Image (cartoon, rainbow, N blue to C red):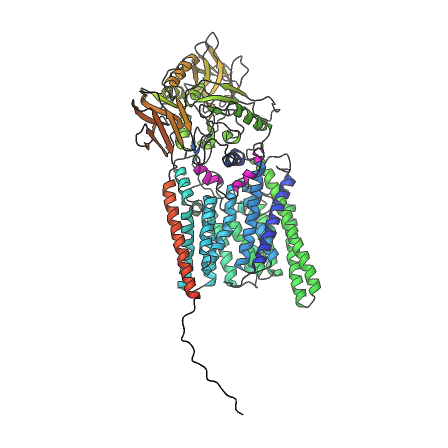
Amino acid sequence: MDRSTVPGATCRAAAALAALVAGVALCAGDLLARDFPFGSRTRSVNDLGNQYVPLHAHLWDLLHGRADGGLLVNWQSGYGSSFLPDFGTYLSSPFAPLVALFPRDRIDLAVYVITVLKIASAAAAMAWLLLRLRPGRWWAAGLLGASYALCGWTLAADYNPMWLDGLIALPLLCLVGEWALAGRRRVLGVLIVALAWSANFYTAYMATLGAGLVLLVRLSLAAPPRRQALAAAGRAVLTVVLGMGLAAPLLAVVYLGTEHAYPGRLARFHPVPAENLLARLLPATYDYSSPALYVGTTALLLALALPFHRAVPGRVRAGWTALVLLVVLSLQWAPTSLAWHAFAVPQGSSYRQSFVLCGLLVIAAWHALSYGPPGLPALGAAGALLALFAAAASRTNLVHAHTWPVLLLGVAGTLTGLLLLRRGGQRGQRGQRGQRGRLAVLAVLVLLGAQTGESAASAAVASGLRLKHLDDYAPWGSRQRLQAAAIARADGWPRYRTDPGREQTVANDPLAVGGQGAAYYSSLTSDVLSRTLTALGGGWTSGGRGVQSLDNAVTDVLFSVGARVHSPPDPHQTHLPEDTAAPTVTRRDVPPLVTVRARPDEAPFGSSPYRNQELLLGSRVYTVPRITVRGDDGRQVPGRWVGSGNALTGPTITTSCPPGTQVNLWAPHFSGTARLTGDTDVAVFRFTNGRALAAMEPLGRAPASGRVRIDLVPDRPGRIPPGAVGCLDTARLSTAAARLKATGATSVTVSDDTVRARLPAGSRGIAVLAAPRIAGWRCAAGDGPARPARQYHGLITVPLDGTETSLTCTFHPPGLRLGTAVGLASLAALLLLGAATAVRRRRLSTPAPTTPPAPRERVTAAP
């Protein structure tokens, strides 16, 4: 192990250069691609637009005191959801509060700036680590630090800003390992581990595994005595345990939040072909389902040259090369892939740990360069390997026409720079120092230019290809401004809810534009919310975790939705001309958030959402008639399958409803459009097997004849269920709503984690709070003790015996008490450890008492 030290100023210079190169290259790539904020193309692809930007907007509202709810409960989404697990999963990064510095309507820009800052910070951290692993040229550490921060994993996943905290965590945790080896900075190491795991536990877990592997290689190369090796490993383990303990208040809440979340889709691991893996080492490639291993041609050639670089000690070459190869193999084997992903197969790409391998490639490249530029034999062997990789990759569809010029320019720049650097060193040995300096400067400029240009081009290509493969959403604009203004005018929380509407812009509209709706999309969407709304006719996306708003009069009464916004279709999604008309708002007289059911029906939900709504309402309001589904040839469709088989281009549903009733269509497994014959309003249904379920839709009023015909235009195979049509008697519904309002709470107050209600005297039966009964709610009636809340068909309920006139429900996120206890214990252990270390150092620095020296005899010089 190299014990040489590098001055702090050198490390700071390398870190600054790395951050500058990474930031400039990333922005240049977005400029080339004409992406936001440098052009007209949106960056909000997939979950960035659907989840992360709206969640950052909600954080902005929290920091400015404008949110409905607080850190514990989010009253805007899912009719009331636990927010601390979402905070710990998406918003606990130390960079996230920077959104407060931007205007609310520039939230997309705020998230972009945070993304650039995170990538620049990862580059700086890696540059600092490289110089601590082994001394070398500061500019080379900066160059390789930037290549790590702009690796293929970053370019493919920078629309997941919370994952970028793991990109920063890997080099920082490797630094913690270096301190553990040296027995230094224990307290700082614990704090860094705690910060990494709090910022994003998912990628921090992968980064911790990667840092552990780096520590093992460092120990094996240093080969200290067994006792010293065990002591260093023990210090590292203790540091990680204490750091995770400090982060436990968030970790425990997030863990138990996932336990109560809707399970989503089941997935299986499928390794990619070897040629696809090799293709992702090259620049300007993109694929959602393969490991993004690009680290820049300079870093890749250096890493490939390491085994052949004779100036590097054999043990060093063997150790780092073996580690890289083992991690490559671990990506392709199901058991180790499962271990990398915390033993849960991810719903999406199975290579989210690729940034760890990118970091190891850069560390290997650093060891090849820090011992001096590789010679021609090593560079020739590396070039031959790269040529073989490119030949194998050329057989895949991951390599595009623009890959080759970018790769050739990168190879040319890298070889030119490395050869100039080596030649400059050789001339310097002969005393030609002036020419040596000029060659070195030229080499640095060539290498930095090649790295910046190659990364910018790869970023631009990845951005363009990503837009072709993933859904995308428009940044904040006139549509959101009009929606937010309409919601603000109609808002009456907590007297009633204002739903942003079925015509959503993103899956988390309530967080983006305000209001208190059913829509909610998160990895932590509660199981009870998703199942309850599905039973009532609701739709969802993302395998059940993206719950949608339900435009239904009965559920509006059940959930106290007194105002509902109706917006034109989103032109960004429909590609229709933009409708500049302001959204409209429909209002309804609804019961309060807390109602009383004197004789609740405890029968379980059934298969019909119409009957389920009536069960929760306590009144009969629907007629559910028999239906007939016919094809465009007039024949009855067997099994009510539409959009498949014998070319059914225009199937219809025929039935009868009481005149004047509101016709609703529930067809969860139908995708296409539906409308009442003769009506102009068209309802859109979206169903994708295993991914999306269509919501119930209102179609209009039944004619005086009572004969109802619904025209369907399917866009894929689907099925119409037997009880698809429900005829709603709105007069009966109004009567039921008035009864619930008369017997409901006389006043309701809502804070972050507490709901208080005043009830009419003599209330008996159960009090129902119109919010999903997620884990963590405790309620007390009157002066009685608080007990875990019961549930009534998925909603919060409290029994009443006629003597209580008040109700208090308080929410405590599951895991918060346990996590806080573990965090306090870890803090106490850290303080004791710090005190013990300080005492030991003080004892070592205090000189031992000695016997005073005897008086010296005076010596007189001889005459």
Nearer to the camera, 666 or 618: 618
The extreme top residue here reads: 705
Nearer to the camera, 637 or 264: 264
> Is 622 located above or below residue 376 in the figure?
above
Q: How many marks?
A: 0
User: Is any atom of residue 571 visible in this view?
Assistant: yes
Residue 369: give x, y in percent of width and height. 58, 59
Nearer to the camera, 36 or 803: 803
> Is 728 located above or below residue 78 in the figure?
above
Residue 250: give x, y in percent of width and height. 42, 42
Residue 834: give x, y in percent of width and height. 42, 56
Which residues are the magenta region?
Answer: 83-107
Nearer to the camera, 75 or 36: 75
Residue 573 sits in quarter: top right
User: Is any atom of residue 354 visible in this view?
Assistant: no
Image quadrant in which the C terminus is located? bottom right
Whether residue 798 sits left or right of residue 118 in the image: it is left
Whether residue 764 sits left or right of residue 673 in the image: it is left
At 62% from the left edge and 49% from the top edge, which residue is drawn?
A: 21
Q: Is residue 92 a member of the stretch shown in magenta?
A: yes
Magenta segment, prevailing SS (helix, strand or loop) = helix
Q: Is residue 188 a member of the stretch shown in magenta?
A: no
Residue 610: give x, y in percent of width and height. 40, 19
Residue 781 sits in quarter: top left
At 46% from the left edge and 10% from the top edge, which residue is drawn?
A: 660
